[in-house]
Image (cartoon, rainbow, N blue to C red):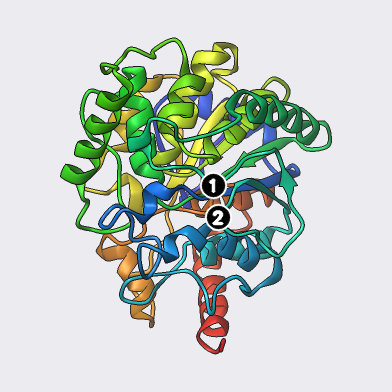
């Protein structure tokens, strides 16, 4: 049998043997894409998140991204979610991957500030509170358990499952959860801006732990408690889906450093799933000089490979997309995971160039929206 070869549209970091084993089992097979959308009041703290044109609009980002993926347009806000400066949501790349691959799409409402105008799975969550309250997420255990059952159901009719997120402010909540768990001893999380507000994020995390009367690492064995105190409503849903699905089929964790908290919690709760999931992300995140997905993953497990898609907007005719090459956005709404999934389910027939071309078509349509 010829050894499996990873195509040039994909890059790899980590355990090559595990990555190739997983890819060989799902290559050319049917996958399902899920995106858990949520909101946290943490994103409304000025300076925390650029995943919206203003701090207040970040609370609408998850619902708007979901509407764009399902309906092709948004109704909860005018236009599409943008960063300051008019840079479009990474959901444009996600939509390109889903359009080209024909993968099934399911939205999970983890707990949104505004209800998305689409059909979705609801696991009982509410919009999260600021992490500085040390009471950030309600009903964590129940949401996790429902997510676990959903993951099991999704695995029944698919060869692999992709999980992802759209939750503004999520790198700050991820840093808080991973600090409480003792996974991270320094701030390695990314930002949707090239000017990563590291000092602000670290200060908010320090304040949050002090409010709870905890030291870093105190919740090493209780990830759900860490999420309850310092997380966001996306986390318990995706931890559950990952743990439930990976008992049966491979899972692609489609996202950046904010999904690192999901992976850290999952391997603590169900270490047996290690070897049956990979992270799927973008080269923009992997090349980010102001964060380190590689070092974060080294802290979580050396048995979770990272696959990243080599989409490149350098020669795009649109500045809004070129900005991705300047350090903006980098990841979100499962753009990396859906792209990796599209390449896998098409057995490599869909390439990074195909994804770029489709993004341009989608972006042209977006520019004509009222």
Q: In which quadrant will I find the C terminus? A: bottom right
- Residue 121 lies, with reference to residue 97, above or below; the image says above
Q: Is residue 4 visible?
A: yes
- Report x, y in % for residue 52: 40, 65
- Report x, y in % for residue 4: 57, 33
Question: Quarter of the image holding residue 257?
Answer: top left
Question: Quarter of the image holding residue 66?
Answer: bottom right
Residue position marked by numbered label 1 in the rendering: 127
Q: Tell me the crowding category of disc 1: few under 14, some 14 to 19, or many 20 or more residues within 10 angstroms, Cα based.
A: many
Camera-side residue: 177 or 140?
140
Q: Is residue 250 visible?
A: no
- Report x, y in % for residue 33: 67, 47
Q: What's the CA distance linking mark 1 and mark 2?
A: 5 Å
Q: Which mark is residue 113?
A: 2
Contact check, label 1 and label 2, Cβ < 8 Å: yes
Q: In which quadrant will I find the N terminus? A: top right
- Residue 331 lies, with reference to residue 123, above or below; the image says below
Secondary element under disc 2, as helix, strand or loop, is loop
Q: Tell me the crowding category of disc 2: few under 14, some 14 to 19, or many 20 or more residues within 10 angstroms, Cα based.
A: some
- Residue at image x 33%, y 45%? 286
Determine the residue located farthest toward the right in the rendered image: 157
Please state if 2 lies on the left or on the right of 216 as rendered: right
Q: Which mark is residue 271?
A: none
User: How many numbered callouts?
Assistant: 2
Earlier along the polypeptide chain: callout 1 or callout 2?
Answer: 2
Secondary element under disc 1, as helix, strand or loop, is loop
- Report x, y in % for residue 133: 37, 35
Please state if 5 lies on the left or on the right of 145 as rendered: left
- Residue at image x 32%, y 71%? 84
- Residue 363 lies, with reference to residue 217, above or below; the image says below
């Amino acid at each position: 049998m010829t050894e499996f070869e990873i195509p040039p549209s994909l890059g790899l970091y980590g355990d090559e043997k595990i990555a190739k084993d997983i890819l060989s089992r799902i290559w050319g097979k049917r996958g399902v894409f899920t995106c858990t959308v949520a909101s946290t009041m943490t994103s409304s703290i000025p300076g925390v998140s650029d995943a919206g044109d203003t701090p207040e609009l970040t609370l609408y980002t998850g619902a708007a991204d979901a509407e764009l993926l399902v309906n092709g347009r948004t109704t909860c806000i005018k236009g599409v979610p943008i960063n300051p400066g008019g840079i479009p949501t990474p959901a444009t790349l996600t939509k390109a991957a889903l359009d080209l691959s024909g993968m099934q799409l399911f939205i999970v409402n983890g707990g949104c500030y505004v209800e998305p105008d689409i059909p979705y799975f609801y696991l009982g969550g509410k919009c999260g509170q600021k992490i500085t309250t040390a009471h950030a997420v309600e009903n964590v255990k129940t949401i996790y358990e429902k997510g676990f059952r959903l993951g099991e159901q999704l695995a029944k009719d698919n060869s692999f499952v992709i999980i992802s997120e759209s939750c503004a402010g999520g790198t700050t909540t991820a840093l808080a959860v991973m600090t409480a768990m003792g996974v991270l001893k320094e701030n390695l999380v990314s930002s949707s801006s090239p000017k990563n507000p590291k000092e602000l994020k670290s200060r908010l995390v320090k304040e949050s732990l002090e409010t709870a009367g905890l030291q870093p690492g105190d919740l090493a064995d209780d990830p759900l408690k860490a999420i309850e105190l310092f997380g966001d409503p996306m986390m318990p849903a995706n931890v559950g889906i990952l743990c439930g699905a990976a008992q049966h089929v491979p899972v692609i964790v489609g996202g950046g450093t904010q999904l690192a908290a999901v992976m850290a919690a999952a391997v603590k709760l169900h270490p047996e799933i290690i070897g049956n999931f990979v992270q799927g992300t973008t080269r923009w995140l992997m090349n980010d000089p102001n964060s380190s997905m590689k070092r974060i993953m080294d802290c979580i497990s050396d048995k979770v490979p990272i696959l990243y898609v080599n989409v490149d907007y350098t020669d795009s005719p649109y500045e809004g997309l070129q900005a991705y090459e300047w350090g903006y956005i980098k990841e979100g709404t499962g753009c990396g995971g859906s792209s990796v999934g599209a390449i896998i389910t098409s057995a490599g027939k869909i390439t990074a160039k195909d994804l770029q071309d489709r993004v341009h078509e989608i972006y042209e349509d977006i520019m004509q929206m009222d």
